[in-house]
Amino acid sequence: MLHLLYTTGSPFARAVRIVLDEIGLDYGRHEEIAAPSAGGLAPPTLQVPTLWHGDLKLWESGIIAEYLLSTFSHRPAVEPPLAHEAFRSDALWRDKLVFSTIQTFGTAATTISQMRWTEVTLDANPYLERLAEKLTHILAWLDGQLGDLESGFQPGFLSIHDIFLAAHVRFVQARPLGIDISLQKYEKLASLLERLDARDSFKANPIWWWEPGIIGYEPDGTPVFEGGDRPA
């Protein structure tokens, strides 16, 4: 059986869980509110999500997603269907470059979020300002990689590119990071994300966010803070 270790608010973990649901795989859920510490189930990188499949242990969300696509061939009857491979042989380097760029977006966004937990804000840190600027440049470039308002990054299929981008962008929009990515300016990306929001796998894995002091969630995903109200 498959097992997945993940944190509640991670967009990388959300993307992997969506891939698992798209394939229709049952798996053991090992959910942590905060990042796991050394000595637990986490890998040597202290990185989540982490996937176990028998004796195989994988971390890094892109590697996990690629493994799932290549290992499990079943695809439920959903349109568009989940792609059978992470990177197409006839567009190998293009697909890898796009996915790497999407993951760069996610890393920048989560870094800004993590720094916010330590009360370091965008306007007080030039490095974080640079990361926020990077987000808009990446979105503009990715919008240009989509063919039209009806296509994803691999036309005719739901790709891991589509899934991870949606997880990362919705993460930014759901968290109080002080960032306005103005998604409406990128019509093709906005159209893609709106379609993905309606898929069962996305609705089954909602966007929840975490920061210090959160001890649980309401059924609709509203965070519950220790002692009641969110700290000022």
Image: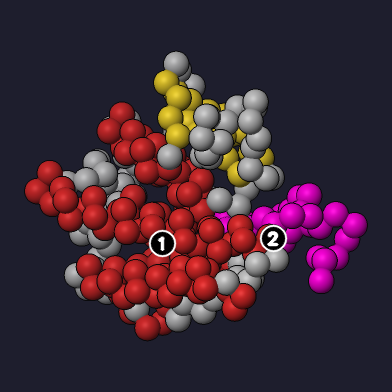
Q: Is residue 5 visible?
A: yes
Q: Nearer the viewer, mark 2 or mark 1?
A: 2
Label 1: state its secondary structure.
Answer: helix
Q: State whether the magenta stretch is mostly helix, strand or loop.
A: loop
Mark 2 neighbour class, 10 Å CA radius: few under 14, some 14 to 19, many 20 or more: few
Mark 1 neighbour class, 10 Å CA radius: few under 14, some 14 to 19, many 20 or more: many
> Which residue is pictured at 76% across the width and 50% down the height?
216
Taking the magenta stretch, the answer to whether it contains residue 30 is: no
Identify residue type, mark 2: Thr
Which of the 4 image quarters holds residue 189?
A: bottom left
Residue 36 in percent (x, y) is at: 64, 37
Which of the 4 image quarters holds residue 24?
A: top left
Q: Is residue 221 visible?
A: no
> Which residue is pictured at 63% across the width and 43% down the height?
35
Taking the magenta stretch, the answer to whether it contains residue 217 is: yes
Tell me the tag on residue 118: 2
Identify residue type, mark 1: Phe
Tell me the tag on residue 105: 1
Outermost residue, right direction? Answer: 227
Residue 41 to residue 144: above or below: above
> Which residue is pictured at 78% across the width and 49% down the height?
215
Magenta residues, as a range?
206-232
Disc on the earlier residue, 2 or 1: 1
